[in-house]
Amino acid sequence: MNINNLIAIIKKKLKDNFVIENISIEDKSFLHKKHKSYQEGKFHLKLNIESVELSQLNTIQSNKKIYKVLDQEMKEHIHSLQILIR
């Protein structure tokens, strides 16, 4: 899957499931290309989410909810996901 399509899917899923004021997604895959566990087609992403709804939860709760919504993408296209919530 192309990174732009993946980012669009992630944004739509998150916005459909949570009240999000702002979201940005950065592709950090280039930082991991020399790692042993690097897989072509699996992305390293950084989510910056501004959400009153998610910020009211503790980190574990909010991350679990996000991982549940992105379950398919995590299995197929995402190697690692860094989540920052404000």
Image (cartoon, rainbow, N blue to C red):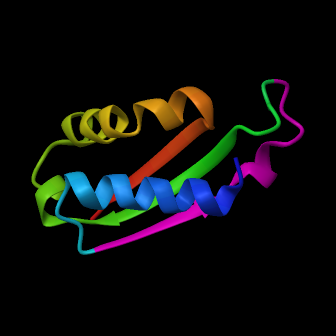
Residue 45 placement (x, y as % from top left): 58, 51
**Relative to 50, residue 5 above or below:** above
Q: Is residue 61 left or right of residue 68?
A: left
User: Measuring 80% from the left and 32% from the top, which residue is drawn there?
Assistant: 38
**Relative to 63, residue 9 above or below:** below
Q: Quadrant of residue 41?
A: top right
Camera-side residue of 11 and 22:
11
User: Measuring 67% from the left and 44% from the top, which residue is drawn there?
Assistant: 43
Residue most toward the right?
34
Instruction: Locate the C terminus by quadrant.
Output: bottom left
**Relative to 4, residue 56 above or below:** above
Q: Is residue 41 left or right of residue 68?
A: right
Residue 4 placement (x, y as % from top left): 64, 63
Residue most toward the bottom?
22
Q: Is residue 19 left or right of residue 46?
A: left
User: Measuring 54% from the left and 59% from the top, which residue is drawn there?
Assistant: 7
Residue 54 placement (x, y as % from top left): 18, 54
Which residues are drawn in magenta? 22-36
Camera-side residue of 43 and 73:
73
Q: Is residue 10 left or right of residue 56?
A: right
Residue 67 placement (x, y as % from top left): 36, 35
Whether residue 26 is in magenta: the answer is yes
Total number of numbered discs in the rendering? 0
Whether residue 21 is in magenta: the answer is no
User: Measuring 19% from the left and 35% from the top, which residue is drawn there?
Assistant: 61
